[in-house]
């Protein structure tokens, strides 16, 4: 595939975007065409707009949680739980990006964080014996929620979120770990024997992050234990974290490895991070026409890419990662974002929806998906963050 090299921004913002203004958005942006130079996208403006659509169309602002369809037109949002983590994660990344230049919008986002916590991320399980409110029979659901709680504390400096994640992990997650001849790992469900990648990858990452925050050895031991379980039982020799390879587990295990490298300084962890992220960008199992493939229209599959993108960006910005992998990620994500940009029907803004596959325009008349919008907005937030950091 021929890689693209992008020239500096020549997109003009005709008025300041505000996610609080229903009139703001793509109608206020104009691409200025210059002779013999292709227009280049202002990724900050694109991220603003895609995240605005996610909030305006899919968020229940009174609860800080998300519906599966615009304004919940399709209904059935009562059991959308683990997906809440990744939808809110987009807002947390947006908050980090704008908090210094737009404090009013940042305050609005922080209020959503507080509401999300208060309403237990739309957890449909209500156990009177659970003081956290986040207990769920699916171990992986709690893991994803904890990662977003941790991210909220990283972004805001308020420990209320990570303290809750610590309690959920200590009380409801690691207590489910099971040991046999294969090692010790986390089961998918409380009453299930399977120990899969979508549970142990985020579990490993939570433990690593809790160790970085609290410095308690049991968390580092847990992270290494879950890493070992994945490597010995799930990871394939070519970089597949599971079969079939799915972007969300590829990205999450890669980030867990990257965190373990920075904790231990053991190069094996960084090599694994590079291996699994690179596999996702190069294997035709993960790609369609050289961009990330459509992983399904369900609320699960449609949101997978939103998990991969931020962790790929983290690796691209890690000075300890290899130059080869970093350059490949930077070009790969820009290629994906450019394809999505070319397939956004901006004339429909603010009903400008991302498709399940970024190489096609979302079909007019179909009911849009929160999962697909989250994946697309995550891509744009990720590219905006990546390029802003590289420009510093």
Image (cartoon, grey):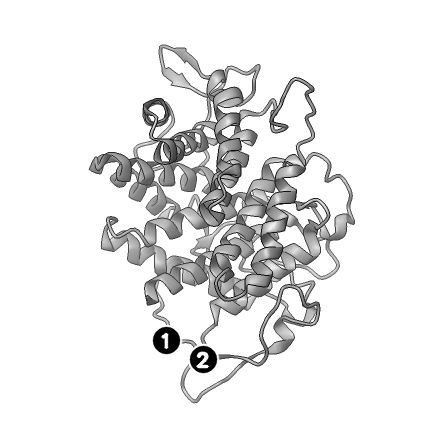
Name above or below for residue 277 compared with residue 317. above
Identify the residue at the far top of this view: 180
If the image is split into quadrants, where does the N terminus sit? bottom left
- Along the line of sight, the residue nearer the viewer: 120 or 51: 120
- Along the line of sight, the residue nearer the viewer: 173 or 195: 173
Q: Distance between the residues labelled 2 and 1?
A: 9 Å
Which residue is identified by label 2?
Answer: 10
Name above or below for residue 100 compared with residue 130. below
Q: Would you identify the image quadrant in which residue 326 lies?
A: bottom left
Residue 272 in percent (x, y) is at 29, 38
Bin the neighbour count of mark 2 within 10 Å (Cα to Cα): few under 14, some 14-19, many 20 and up: some
Residue 110 in percent (x, y) is at 58, 51
Residue 26 in view here: yes
Residue displayed at 34% across by 41% down: 276
Mark 2 lies on a secondary structure that is loop
Bin the neighbour count of mark 1 within 10 Å (Cα to Cα): few under 14, some 14-19, many 20 and up: few
Mark 1 lies on a secondary structure that is loop
Q: Do the residues labelled 2 and 1 touch (CB within 8 Å)?
A: yes
Residue 130 in percent (x, y) is at 63, 21
Q: Which mark is residue 7?
A: 1
Name above or below for residue 280 compared with residue 3. above
Q: Residue 317 carries which label?
A: none
Left or right: residue 86 compared with residue 314: right
Residue displayed at 32% across by 66% down: 392
Residue 355 in view here: no
- Along the line of sight, the residue nearer the viewer: 127 or 352: 127
Residue 317 in percent (x, y) is at 32, 54
Residue displayed at 49% across by 17% down: 176
């Amino acid at each position: 595939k021929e890689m693209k090299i992008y020239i500096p921004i020549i997109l003009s913002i005709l008025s300041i975007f505000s996610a609080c203004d229903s009139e703001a958005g793509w109608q206020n942006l104009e691409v200025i065409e210059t002779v013999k130079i292709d227009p280049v996208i202002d990724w900050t403006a694109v991220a603003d707009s895609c995240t605005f659509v996610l909030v305006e169309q899919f968020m229940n602002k009174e609860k800080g949680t998300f519906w599966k369809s615009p304004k919940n037109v399709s209904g059935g949002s009562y059991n959308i739980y683990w997906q809440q983590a990744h939808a809110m994660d987009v807002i947390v990344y947006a908050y980090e990006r704008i908090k210094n230049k737009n404090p009013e919008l940042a305050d609005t986002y922080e209020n959503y964080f507080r509401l999300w916590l208060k309403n237990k991320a739309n957890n449909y399980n209500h156990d009177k014996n659970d003081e956290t409110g986040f207990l769920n029979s699916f171990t992986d659901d709690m893991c994803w929620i904890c990662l977003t709680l941790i991210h909220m504390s990283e972004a805001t400096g308020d420990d209320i979120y990570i303290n809750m994640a610590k309690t959920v992990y200590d009380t409801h997650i690691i207590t489910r770990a099971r040991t046999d001849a294969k090692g010790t790992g986390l089961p998918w469900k409380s009453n299930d024997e399977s120990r899969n990648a979508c549970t142990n990858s985020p579990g490993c990452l939570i433990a690593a992050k809790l160790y970085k925050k609290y410095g308690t050895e049991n968390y580092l031991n847990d992270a290494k234990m879950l890493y070992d379980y994945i490597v010995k039982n799930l990871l394939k020799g070519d970089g597949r974290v599971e079969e079939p390879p799915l972007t969300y587990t590829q990205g999450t295990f890669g980030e867990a490895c990257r965190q373990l490298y920075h904790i231990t300084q053991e190069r094996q962890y960084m090599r694994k991070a590079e291996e699994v992220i690179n596999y996702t960008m190069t294997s035709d199992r993960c790609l369609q026409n050289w961009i990330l493939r459509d992983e399904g229209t369900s609320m699960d599959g449609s949101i997978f890419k939103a998990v991969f993108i931020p962790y790929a960006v983290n690796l691209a910005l890690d000075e300890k990662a290899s130059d080869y992998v970093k350059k490949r990620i930077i070009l790969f994500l820009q290629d994906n974002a450019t394809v999505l940009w070319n397939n956004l029907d901006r004339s429909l803004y603010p009903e400008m929806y991302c498709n399940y596959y970024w190489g096609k325009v979302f079909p007019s008349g179909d009911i849009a998906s929160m999962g697909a919008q989250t994946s697309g907005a995550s891509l744009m937030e990720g590219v905006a963050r990546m390029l802003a950091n590289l420009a510093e």
